[in-house]
Amino acid sequence: MTYRYRCGTCRAAARPTATRAESEARRDHHRDTVHGGLVPGGDRVVRVRGAEARDPDVRYVSGRAVLIGLGLLAAATAVSRVLGR
């Protein structure tokens, strides 16, 4: 399962974590640094699924796109060899 901390006051969301304990640690750090240790209204740790569970800073490249790119590269190499001779 994947969890994410959300602060209702700041409207901020932490990166997804693998465990609830990690998200709670991020919550505690946010409370201490931004809100002076106070509990902001609407902050919570939620379980997320699907696209929301992925880290937005990690780019996903599909296998299909990679195979198409390699196929195009192979075709371009073959054409350049034929035309080069």
Image (cartoon, rainbow, N blue to C red):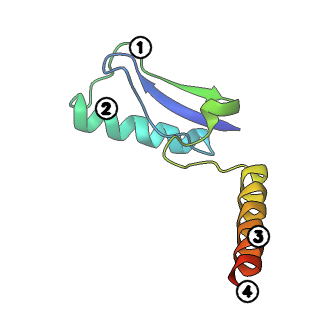
Q: Which mark is residue 5?
A: none
Q: Of tags 1 and 3, which is closer to the observer?
A: 3
Residue at the image position 70 percent from the left and 31 percent from the top: 50
Label 4 crowding class (10 Å Cα cut-off): few <14, some 14-19, many 20+? few
Question: Mark 2 highlights which residue?
Answer: 31
Image location (x, y in percent) of residue 1: 71, 38
Question: Mark 3 highlights which residue?
Answer: 74
SS for callout 2: helix
Q: Do the residues bearing badges 1 and 3 touch, measured as CB atoms within 8 Å?
A: no
Q: Nearer the viewer, residue 25 or 3?
A: 3
Label 1 crowding class (10 Å Cα cut-off): few <14, some 14-19, many 20+? few
Q: Do the residues bearing badges 3 and 2 touch, measured as CB atoms within 8 Å?
A: no
Question: Mark 1 highlights which residue?
Answer: 42
**Nearer-N-terminus badge (2/4):** 2
Question: What's the amino acid at mark 2?
Answer: Arg
Label 2 crowding class (10 Å Cα cut-off): few <14, some 14-19, many 20+? some
In-image side of 35 versus 51 (left or right): left
Image location (x, y in percent) of residue 3: 60, 35
SS for callout 3: helix
In-image side of 13 versus 17 (left or right): left
Give the distance between the C-alpha atoms of the residues marked 1 and 3, in whole angstroms. Answer: 54 Å
Give the distance between the C-alpha atoms of the residues marked 4 and 1, in whole angstroms. Answer: 69 Å
Question: Mark 4 highlights which residue?
Answer: 85
